[in-house]
Image: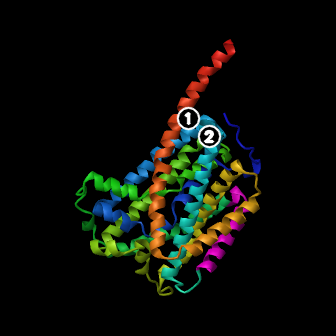
């Protein structure tokens, strides 16, 4: 098997932290307005689509862990090199680096679009992009443990947002959720497929696995992180369906943020401004983890220092944030990327697991023959 890259003991993390890594990687800009897209497909059964998508993440993660356990302390990049050989493996590694880069760009560009739409419509895209990239560079240069620490505090400090969903419930109607299963299974599954862009992030496990100290204990925190994410998405979807009328939800681009716009306090009139600004803390783990995953793939292909890589990466992303300007272009990227991500995240890991089992089986059969010779 392909030898894994030597790891720095100072970068190792405990298994329980994977709860925060997985959940922090999944919750990002998608939750701000995923409801409309899912509702277009499954109507009032959209929450079932979200639930199905959440269950699918558990199944795929099970396959990911099984594959990683076969290879011990190797990550996805090393596994692909071992199964497919040097040339094809490196080609697939380059594609996965591209995937992480596009995921990073999508999260960043969508958040900038939210800031433009809700708070600062006239502020320059270059300024917001540069500011966020500098923050990400600073976190990245601190190493994996700093990135995991950011994920931890991001979740802990943002838990207060969840109780805010109780305010829209005062004006919600549970009747909007019925009748259940009125839509056919095809529409519900189509809605689950549309959740791809929103629910991705857990695939970071493929890259971070070698850095976990107690690998035997990763299952529980990882699946709890997936469960927590699924519950949040299901609750947000159900609240949105119950609150909005059918026509209103179909026309609301950022349904979650619009829910917050109806919240007001004597000392805060526009609560959604607070939510949008605070959301930066929520997307930072997304960005840091995708950047770090891309770096782990690049060093398999070329020798490059982390500081050199992060500046080159940031300049490329910065240039593309200036090129992609309109909402139509951003939506097109989201749609295309979501379709590609479905195969990368939900189909490929299952195929890779099967190939890893077959390679292990045939490799074990060759050993006795060599010994006999």
Tell me the quarter of the picture where residue 87 sits.
Answer: top right
In the rendered image, which quarter contains the N terminus?
Answer: top right
The residue to which callout 2 is attached is: 79
Please state the horizontal and vertical placement of residue 122, each as a whole percent of the image.
Answer: 54, 87
Q: Which residues are magenta?
A: 125-146
In what element is the residue under mark 1? helix
Residue 54 visible within the image:
yes
Is 20 part of what is drawn in magenta?
Answer: no
Nearer to the camera, 53 or 331: 331
Residue lying at the far top in this picture: please name it. Answer: 372
- Residue occupying the point 59% across, 47% down: 92
Question: From what the image shows, is residue 223 above or below residue 266?
Answer: above
In what element is the residue under mark 2? helix
Is 140 part of what is drawn in magenta?
Answer: yes
The residue to which callout 1 is attached is: 356
Graded by Cα atoms within 10 Å as few (under 14), some (14 to 19) or many (20 or more), the crowding at tag 1 reads many
In the rendered image, which quarter contains the C terminus?
Answer: top right
Q: Is residue 270 left or right of residue 8?
A: left
Q: CA distance from mark 1 to mark 2?
A: 8 Å
Kindly report the secondary structure that dominates the magenta region of the rendered protein: helix
Please state the horizontal and vertical placement of residue 70, each as a whole percent of the image.
Answer: 59, 34
Question: From what the image shows, is residue 52 above or below residue 263?
Answer: above
- Residue occupying the point 56% across, 77% down: 277
Q: Are marks 1 and 2 in contact (CB under 8 Å)?
A: yes
Residue 18 visible within the image:
no
Please state the horizontal and vertical placement of residue 297, each as a whole percent of the image.
Answer: 66, 51
């Amino acid at each position: 098997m392909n030898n894994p890259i030597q790891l720095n003991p100072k970068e190792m993390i405990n298994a329980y932290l994977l709860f925060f890594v997985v959940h922090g990687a999944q919750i990002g800009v998608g939750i701000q307005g995923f409801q409309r897209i899912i509702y277009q497909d499954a109507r009032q059964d959209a929450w079932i689509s979200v639930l199905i998508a959440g269950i699918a993440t558990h199944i795929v993660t099970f396959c990911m862990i099984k594959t990683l356990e076969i290879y011990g302390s190797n990550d996805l990049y090393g596994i692909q090199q071992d199964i497919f050989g040097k040339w094809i493996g490196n080609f697939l590694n380059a594609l996965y680096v591209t995937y992480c880069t596009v995921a990073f760009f999508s999260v960043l560009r969508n958040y900038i679009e939210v800031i433009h739409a809700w708070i600062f419509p006239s502020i320059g895209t270059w300024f917001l992009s540069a500011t966020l990239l500098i923050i990400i560079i600073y976190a990245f240069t601190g190493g994996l443990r700093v990135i995991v620490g950011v994920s931890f505090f991001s979740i802990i400090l943002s838990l207060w947002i969840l109780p805010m969903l109780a305010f829209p419930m005062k004006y919600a109607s549970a009747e909007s959720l019925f009748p259940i299963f009125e839509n056919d299974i095809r529409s519900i599954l189509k809605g689950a497929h549309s959740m791809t862009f929103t629910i991705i992030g857990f695939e970071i496990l493929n890259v971070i696995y070698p850095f976990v100290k107690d690998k035997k204990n990763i299952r529980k925190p990882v699946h709890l992180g997936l469960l927590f994410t699924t519950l949040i998405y299901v609750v947000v979807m159900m609240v949105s369906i119950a609150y909005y009328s059918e026509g209103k939800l179909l026309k609301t681009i950022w349904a979650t943020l619009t829910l917050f716009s109806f919240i007001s306090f004597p000392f805060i009139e526009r609560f959604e401004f607070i939510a949008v600004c605070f959301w930066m803390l929520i997307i930072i783990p997304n960005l840091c983890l995708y950047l770090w995953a891309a770096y782990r793939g690049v060093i398999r292909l070329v020798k490059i220092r982390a500081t050199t890589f992060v500046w080159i990466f940031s300049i490329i992303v910065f240039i593309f944030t200036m090129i992609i300007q309109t909402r139509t272009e951003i939506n097109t990227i989201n749609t295309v990327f979501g379709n590609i991500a479905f195969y990368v995240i939900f189909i490929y890991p299952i195929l890779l697991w099967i190939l890893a089992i077959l390679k292990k089986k045939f490799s074990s059969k060759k050993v006795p023959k060599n010994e006999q010779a």
